Structures are given as C-alpha cells and as structure tokens.
Image (cartoon, rainbow, N blue to C red):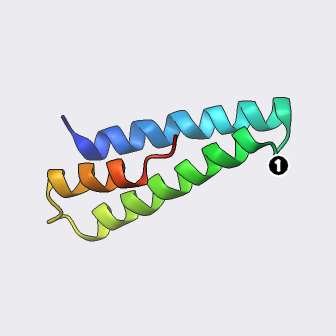
Amino acid sequence: MNTIEDILNRIEFLRKKMTEVAMDKGFTNIESVHISQELDLLLNLYEDVKNNPQLATNDIESKLDENKLT
C-alpha cells in the first residue's frame, strides 16, 4: 500500500464530496463541516509527511487511525 498516494486520493475524494454536500445542503450543514474537518486533518498529515519523508508507513497509518472521524 502506498500511504502517501492513499492520502492524496482521499483528499481528492473529500474535496469533491464536500463541494457536492455543501452545494446541496449548505456550507454550515453538519455533514459539510464533518467532511471539512476530516479534509483538514488529511491535509495536515500530508504536509507532515511531505516535510518529514522519514516518517514510517506505520506512523502515518497510526496518525490516520487516530484522526479518523466517524
């Protein structure tokens, strides 16, 4: 599994979904906000990985699990 690629794929998916939900239900709708929060976490994680290439895949996956929103 290529974790960085997975992060980027999830970011792109969430961007599209957030746009669809926000246009349909409004930007302040709880679902829009929830997606936006998850997107923020992933963008921050991606920046961490980009700035620290030595992060192990296990560390990245742990951060993803820790920050997963339900």
68 w.r.t. 41: above or below: above
Q: State the quadrant of the N terminus.
A: top left
25 w.r.t. 3: above or below: above
32 w.r.t. 23: above or below: below
56 w.r.t. 25: above or below: below
Quick one: which residue is furthest to the front in this view?
70
Q: Is residue 68 left or right of residue 54?
A: right
Viewer-proximal residue among 57 and 16: 57
Where does residue 48 sit, x and y in percent of width and height?
Answer: 34, 66
Where does residue 65 sit, x and y in percent of width and height?
Answer: 33, 48
At a point 63% along the width and 49% down the height, the residue shown is: 36
At a point 25% along the width and 43% down the height, the residue shown is: 3
At a point 83% along the width and 29% down the height, the residue shown is: 24
Residue type at mark 1: give it: Thr
Residue at mark 1: 28
At a point 20% along the width and 58% down the height, the residue shown is: 59
Q: Is residue 3 left or right of residue 25?
A: left
